Structure formats: C-alpha cells, structure tokens
Image (cartoon, grey):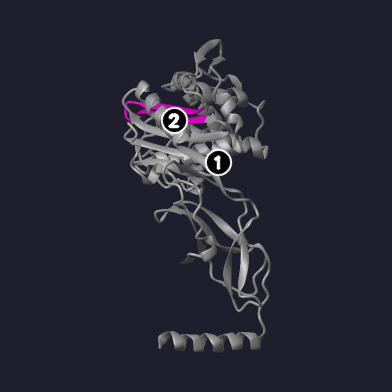
Amino acid sequence: MKKSIVAILLITLLLTTGSVYGESFDSRADVAVLMEASSGQFLYEKNADTPLPPASTTKIMTLLLAFEALERGDIDWDDTTIVSRNAWSAEVVGSRMFLDLDQEVSIRDLIYGISIVSANDGTVALAEHLSGSEEAFVQQMNQRAQELGMTNTVFRNTSGLPADGHVMSARDIAILSRELIVNHPGILDIETQPEFTFNDIHQYNWNRRFLSSFEGANGLKTGWTDESRFNLAGAALRDGRQLISVVMGAESESERVAATSELLNHGFNQFSPQTIAQKGEVVAEVAVKDGRQQVVPVTVPQEVEVAVPQGRENDIELVVAEETLTAPVEEGAVAGQLLVQLDDETLYSVQLYTAEEVGRANFFVRGFRGIMNFITGLFNRS
C-alpha cells in the first residue's frame, strides 16, 4: 500500500486526539485501557498487550457466543437444558447460581446467572448445551478470539477459573467487550440488574459497587482469583457516549472501582466526539493507472467519528494510504484507507471505496501518457 498525503486531505481540523499518545493522565492501575465503543478507538493504554489471568472477564466471550447463537436462531431464550454432573454446583468452585444435578434450566436463567452473579456452573451448562461439551465450546471461544484479532488471548475453560496458559490482555478484553456491547446491547440491561434469584437463593450483582457509584455505569464484568487479583471490564454511558474500560491486577475491589472510575471520568471529561466525514462522503481522489480518467473519487462507507482530547486543537491530519489501482476499476472497489493521525500516530482508520467506475483508456491514450511520462522523467533528472 502506497502512503501518500493528498493535498486536499491534509486538512487541519478544529479537533483533538487521544491522550493515549500523551502523558497527561496516568492510571493508578498497572494494566489499563480505555476505549470509545462506537469506533473502537483507544483513548488510553497502559501495558495493554500483556497476557494476564483474566478470571471471570473470560465470561464475556461465553456470553458473546451465546448471544450470537440466539441471533442465528440456534437457541431460544426459553429453551431448556439438563444440568450434567460437570455443571452441577457441587462439582464447581467459585461463584455459582447453584444449579442442581439433573435440573432443567432455561437458557434465559443461565445467561442471567452468568451475567449478574458470574455463575461458573452456568457457563459449563451453557457450553454443554451449545457445543456438547465444555472442551468443544472452548475451541469455539479461541476461534472467535482469533477472528476478532485478540492476539494475546488463550482460553482453557468457559469461566476463567485458574488454568495453565489461560490468559487475556486488557486490549483483548476491551475488543471483546465492544463486540458484545455494540452488537448485542441487550446485555447491558441484564448486567445492570441489581440481584438474581435462582433455586430460592438470592444473590446481589457482583458488580454492584461500580454500578451504584459511577454515574452512567451500565456494565460489564468483574473478575477475581488469587492469581489474577481484581479485574474489571467497566462500561458507562453518558450523553449518548458509550465508553469501555479495562483494569487488571488491582489489589482490592475498591482499588479496581477507583481505577475504573478515574479512567472513565478521564474519557468523558477530556475527550469529545468529532465527526470527520459523513457516510458516503467523497473525501479524496486516488490515482488510477491506465484509466480513462487518471483519478477516481473515493468515499467512506460509514460516518467517521473520532474522540479527541482538549489541548490539541488544529493538530489532526487526514492521510490517504492508497491501494494501487489499475483500470478497469469497478465502483465500490477498495481504494485504500483514510487514516486519522496525530503526531504521525494513527488514531483511527477506515477503508476507502471508489465512488464510480473507471474504464480502461485506449491504446493511443496510454501510449501518449507513457511518452509524456518519459519526457517528464528526463527533465526531472536534468
């Protein structure tokens, strides 16, 4: 891909960029990320790619696969399954919804139990229903992680209980959380339920401290083991902006809530969304070799919105990284990427597509252009 700064795209905007590239904010957590959910733009990173024990934030993947199965129609909320010995609460350690052996339980109850009280037994029962065994389901979890570009994640089980080699990075947890929240927003209605009762056992939401203390909090998943310490994939919505935060390895529950709150406040207070281009807007022209016309207009397939921080006004640049196009070129062909940059760092990128077709120039036109290019090259060398 040839990177060229097109003159009409070197636009200085009344915008700012992410403090992921600055040092004005330092999270109290050793491992932390902050993401704008709408675009997937990272606003803050600290040791973001370090593989660590994720504990129950693992269950975000379990829930994602369940919601995708619901969307495909493979399962229904009111479908039921029978609790096996592997899923029986007496055989499962850690947080549970207290499933009984051979009990009939609905998919709805399993998803609610996993979401609200982090039910380890629920993840096994759900996995067995969807894939026949927990082992088969874990294979699907790892495959989905690869599809999402989660390069520092390996799953060994459905719950996040300690297992050799079971790791995730903060970045991967954020990517996974965004996939679930953006495509299945109903999860947030479940995650914010204050309590859950099953088999006459009443339990409070495991994320209640964060949900009750932070304005706009609407998710997502806590995690704790002796090995992982205190993890939290946080989510909050204010004025239509959904942010996602991840904190890993905090020393206490109060510390992870404090670190999460600081991250999210930083995002809400120091950044604002700015629209760079509208869906379908022509943003540049890209060269076409041997075309009847030598350039083609290119568009973005979606609204391009970037979160930008205070204090960096007039510093954003738009750069086109072009594909090499040779006529004939169809309308809608991939033409490169539009890069939103600050200090030569790419904050956000979106694919560009041709806005019209370009036919191939005839032999005489191509020959004339070749002669002119040769002559121009001679003059440039002299």
Q: Earlier in the sequence, mark 1 or mark 2?
A: 1
Which span of residues is magenta-colored?
Answer: 218-236
Q: Is residue 225 magenta?
A: yes
Question: Position of 190 compared to 264: left or right?
Answer: right
Of 348 and 102, which appears nearest the observer? 348
Q: Identify the residue position indicated by label 1 in the image.
A: 38
Report the predominant secondary structure element of the magenta stretch.
strand
- Give percent across and percent down for residue 326: 59, 74
Q: Identify the residue position indicated by label 2 in the image.
A: 265
Of 296 and 331, which appears nearest the observer? 296
Residue 223 visible somewhere in the drawing: yes
Image quarter hosting the C terminus? bottom left
The residue drawn where x is 38% and y is 25% is: 258
SS under mark 2: helix
Q: Is residue 374 magenta?
A: no
Q: Amino acid at mark 2?
A: Asn
